[in-house]
Structure formats: structure tokens, C-alpha cells
Image: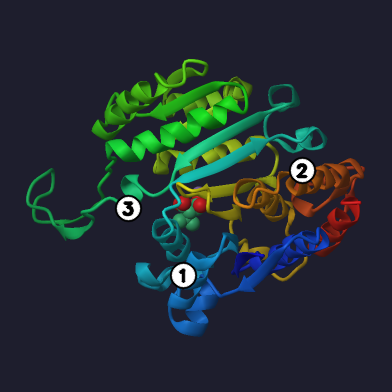
Amino acid sequence: MKKIAVLAGDGIGPEIMAQALAVLRALDLPLAFEEALVGGAAYEAHGHPLPEATLALAQSADAVLFGAVGDWKYDVLERRLRPEQAILGLRKALGLFANLRPALCYEQLVHASSLKPELVAGLDILIIRELTGDIYFGQPRGRRTATDGHFPGTEEAFDTMRYSRPEIERIAHVAFQAARQRGRHVTSVDKNNVLETSQLWKDVVVEVHKEYPDVTLEHMLVDNAAMQLVKAPRKFDVLVTGNLFGDILSDEAAMLTGSIGMLPSASLDANNKGLYEPSHGSAPDIAGQDMANPLATILSAAMMLRYSLDLAPAAQRIEAAVQKVLEQGLRTADIWSEGCQKVGTRAMGEAVVRALG
Ligand code: IPM
Ligand code: MN
């Protein structure tokens, strides 16, 4: 029996998680689910977005299935108590340094993309974002009175962008190994014309690449990458980049596919233990209305079966079922178009369960 920590979180989190669990349960796998509060929900109940018990459950589990956290009403809290700290804390505490964010354009949804169909048809990119380093976690950070710069004597804030050689090496290996399972092409994205961290990034990626002569490597500056993603997105296969650039580019890539409501993600440690979550947020504006698209969470559950639980056939069954409901014309509001049948969160989940066969 494998233990799955189920952290549904805030906003639409509980609704989409309920559907992912229904799909997993229908597969009748040797999995035990244990739920815990996280994010704003945990703050309300325990005064902290990532309570000890939740972290302990995540650490003891074989994998973590995560919904979403956050609500604007928590923006007034001091940073360490905000819901987002829960996901950042889990990434750091569990050592989840490799974030896999596929951007896949389903044939049936090609018209939902903000780009022309001919640019995105068949799009299949894997963004690999380093997740535990960079300016997200770099010390020192804080506020102080400036002693130099343009305005000495005034208040300033500062963050530190940092990367160490081993941090870059291990994410580069993940990227090259992933490329071997796909199109054998890696685009490494940085800002080496300005940043020292990016120069180290590029140097290390070039070195690691020597172990993967069967994979082609290309370097791209992040501003150009942002442009190429909307100009010719299909030229990418695996895109590997740091935490901050990856945050931004993965949202951009997600939108190319029509809906962020379709995209799963995996955050892995060195042993393929992982946290799986939809790429979208908690969408408090539509929470509790049976409107949210549960497919990203359902597909995240599939990634969990594949990467952390060695249950690839079951993962394929889920992915095929999702494909089937799209072919049947079922659409939640975010991906709906003329001629399709609009369904709610629950009906979509139930349709996937039926499509499992
Ligand atoms: C994401 C989110 C998080 C991030 C936030 C919620 C801290 O945007 O997973 O992409 O910036 O990493
Ligand atoms: Mn983000």
C-alpha cells in the first residue's frame, strides 16, 4: 500500500481534488489517501499555512497530491503566514527541485488557444523549471535604509539571485534525461548577457551536455524565449530554466494550449518522490460554483502514478480517458466553445471515470 498525502487547499482546490480522487479510486489501485489542511484553510484552522502535521504527512507519504492555495483576502497577512508559503515551504522541505510542466495542445482545444491554430496544433513542450533555488530562496533578502545607489538614505528592498553548480547540474541532468524520452532537444534559457548566475547556469549546462551527445542543446536568452514561445512554439521540445524565469515562461506556455485548466505538473526530488498539482491557481472567484476544470488535477494524478508510483499503465488509462471526454465534446467553461456541451466540475470528473472503461 502506498500512502498519498492529499492536500486540497483553498478556493477550487477541494472541488477539483474530489474529482481527481474519484478517478484514482475508480482505478482500484493499492493506494491509501490521507488528507490534511494546507494554505488559507490551514491558516484559518491552525494559524499557519503549513502546519507541522501537514508537513509531517507530506514527508511520510510516497507522493503528495496538491490542489491549490491562496485567496486575495490573505494579502494583508505578513508574508510567512500567506497561503503561498505553504507550497514554497513544501518544495523546500521536500527538496522538490525539479518542476515538470508539460504544455500540450489537445487537438480538440486548438481553437481555445490565443494563438492561431496553425501555430499551436500538435504543440508538445516540456518546461523544466528549477524549483528550490534562485531569487525565490536566495539569501540575503529584506528591507533596509539604502547607504548607496541613486537614493541613499531612503527605504529599499532586496532579494538575491543565487545558483550553485550542483543545483544547476542536477536540473540539467533531469532535462537531458527527459529529452531522451522525447524529441532529444533541450533549450536552456537564461540571461547570461546580464547576470552572473545565468553565466554559471550556461557554463554548467554545457558541461553536463557532454554526457548526452545524443541530445541537441540550444541556449536562448529569456526575453527571446518569451518571444519565440508566441512566435514559433513548436520549435521547443524540452525547455530548462531557473525558478523565476520558469515561473513566468510556464504560464506563457500554458496559455498557448488554450487553457491552464488542462495542465498538470510534477515537482520531483532526487528519488522521484514528488508533489503533483495543477498548473493553475485557486481561482477564488469561481470557488464553490461547480465551474472549475478538474482535468489538470486529474492529469496531475496521472503524472503521480507514472513518476512516483511506477504505475504507468494506470496513468495511461487516465490520460486516454481525458482524451476521450474531450472527443465526446464535454467542456468546462474555461475550454468551452460553440457546439460543445458545457459541464461542471463534478460532471466532468464523472465523465472521466466512465471513460476509464
Ligand atoms: C507557481 C506559483 C507559485 C510560484 C506561487 C504561488 C508562489 O505561481 O507554482 O507557479 O511562483 O512558484
Ligand atoms: Mn506561477
What's the CA distance linking mark 2 and mark 3? 35 Å
- 140 versus 239 height, above or below: below
Residue 157 lies left or right of residue 19; in this view the side is left
What's the CA distance linking mark 2 and mark 1? 30 Å
The local secondary structure at tag 3 comes to: loop
What's the CA distance linking mark 3 and mark 1? 19 Å
Residue 126 percent location from the top left of the image:
58, 34
Residue 131 percent location from the top left of the image:
43, 47
Give me the disc on residue 214: none
Residue 69 percent location from the top left of the image:
55, 65
Mark closer to the observer (3, 1): 1
Q: Nearer the viewer, residue 129 or 313?
A: 313
Q: Which residue is mark 3?
A: 137
- 188 versus 328 height, above or below: above
**Disc 2: CA contacts within 10 A as few (<14), some (14-19) or many (>=20):** some
Q: Is mark 2 within 8 Å of ligand 1?
A: no
Mark closer to the observer (2, 3): 2
Residue farthest along the bottom direction in this orientation: 45
Residue farthest along the front direction in this orientation: 1
Q: Is residue 99 visible?
A: yes
Q: Which residue is mark 1?
A: 55
Quadrant (top left, top right, bottom left, bottom right) of the N terminus:
bottom right
Determine the image quadrant of residue 165.
Answer: top left
Q: Residue at x 61, y 28 (%)?
A: 181
Q: Amino acid at mark 2?
A: Gln
- 305 versus 256 height, above or below: below
Q: Which residue is mark 2?
A: 316
Q: Residue at x 57, y 24 (%)?
A: 236
Residue 110 percent location from the top left of the image:
77, 33
Q: Do the numbered discs 3 and 1 sit on residues whose CB atoms are within 8 Å?
A: no
Q: Amino acid at mark 3?
A: Phe
